[in-house]
Amino acid sequence: MFFYMSLLMISSTVFGQNTTTHVQDAFRQFESDDQVKHALVSLYVIDAKTGKVVFDRNSQIGLAPASTQKIITSVTAFELLGKDYRYKTNFGVTVVPEGQVLYVKGSGDPTLGSWRWENTKEEQVTNRIKKAIGVNASTIRNVRFDTTGWSDTGTPDGWIWQDIGNYYGAGAGSLNWRENQYDLILKAGPNTGDPVEVVKTEPRLYADTVFSMATAGPKGSGDNAYIYKPGERYAKYGTIAGSVVKGTIPAGESAFRISGSMLNPFSEFKSLFFRTTKNGYEAAGLEDFIAKPGTGVVYLHEEVSPPLDSIIYWFNKKSINLYGEALIKTIGFEKNKKGYTREGIKILRSFWKEKGLDDEELNMVDGSGLSPLNRVTTHAQVTILHYAKARSWYPSFYAALPEYNAMKMKSGTISGAKGFCGYHKAKDGNEYIFSFLVNNYSGTASSLVNKMYKVLDVLK
């Protein structure tokens, strides 16, 4: 028996050495490629069962992780909020001089009005609110929001202007509605260079108007259009008129769809409520509907979100940046009554420092990884993934990871940065945890990805 066990240990050690050698060879070839000639590359791989390092290159160098950062936010949320955590948004009525007012106490719920669950769809939510208010719904003259403890700034520091007007750049606040996004329907002229017209938005926007400065590109050229939020003055309109779409869509398209981020989710919720209660829409400035806690409010209804594990499933599967920003603010609010991005990140870093991880390895400015200012190490990512594997909620976290290259891993992409991190069980039964980040590469992302896959294939 002793001989048999010794043989197994020797075999395992030899195989581990062979894997390390194979990864070294594959990584050496990757590093010699012209596409990463001026890039900074890091790969860290450990044995999932023993924690032993299989391969390490630059694992202590902080790099922009893009959406692979979502695994850090996810694991921290599971630990600090719990897999069964649910957001609770309360709706009530009070009387003010102008009449009955609907009061909304936001909870930071990123799923309110989302189409991803049947129960969270906007029609379902508004119907439940109206039913709870009853006959009073038709007498409501205004909507006010209790934002106590939450940051009024939806966009985290470090997000770039080209991102924040588009659906993936939707920030999070105390009230998020329909994932804070809308669809923009565009019509292009028949020839390259022709103007592109705005047909409509879905849903109709009340707090924003979208103007087009886009043109028609060659047929089949795809979506090269970006939406920019107000902030730039255009001579054509004479003022800061609203959001503007620039770039190109294919010539001849009559109903080309792109998605943008709402300028003001509070106002869009308010307008929908009035429209569905047949009160009409009462235009109001921001100061009219952002309020401190109301006095004399009778709360009549509570909207409860899906559980956290379900939220994190979509967060990682579809890489929804809004969910990451909501989660990091929620951590700050639940732990210190400060629903601010910086507070959530401070708590996150402190938590992992207590677990033995150097907090300087987690230089984060947001919860989703969209900002190019984020810097985390592959060592930190692998350490966090290894920690998750021993937790009771791990099956939910593992199920939420997408599959690329026949491996369970989160991908990440922003300009000049590409990454993969996750888990893989090899054919021989050995299990690995890895993080692979590349910054400042040249050429196309698709070409780089194929080369990264060749390195990761060694773990199969």
Image: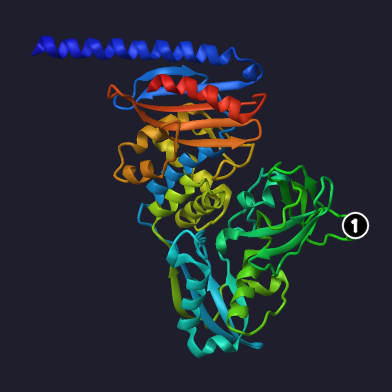
Please, what is the three-letter code of the amino acid marked with disc 1?
Lys
21 to 275, vertically: above or below: above
37 to 233, vertically: above or below: above
- Return the x and y of residue 112 as percentages of the image width and height: 51, 64
Quadrant (top left/top right/bottom left/bottom right) for the N terminus: top left
Instruction: Identify the residue at image location x=65%, y=46%.
Output: 157
- Return the x and y of residue 22 as percentages of the image width and height: 42, 12
Which picture quadrant has residue 261?
bottom right
- Return the x and y of residue 31 as percentages of the image width and height: 57, 15
Q: At numbered mark 1, what does the secondary structure look like: helix, strand or loop?
A: loop
The residue tagged 1 is 236
Q: Seen in the image, is 69 located left or right of residue 431? A: right
State the residue in front, 38 or 293: 38
The answer, for residue 115, to whether it is visible in the render is yes
Residue that extends furthest to the left in the rendered view of this protein: 1
**How would you rate the neighbour count of disc 1 (Cα within 10 Å): few for under 14, some for 14-19, many for 20 or more?**
few
279 to 373, vertically: above or below: below
243 to 397, vertically: above or below: below
Q: Seen in the image, is 385 located left or right of residue 411? A: left
- Return the x and y of residue 460 as percentages of the image width and height: 37, 23
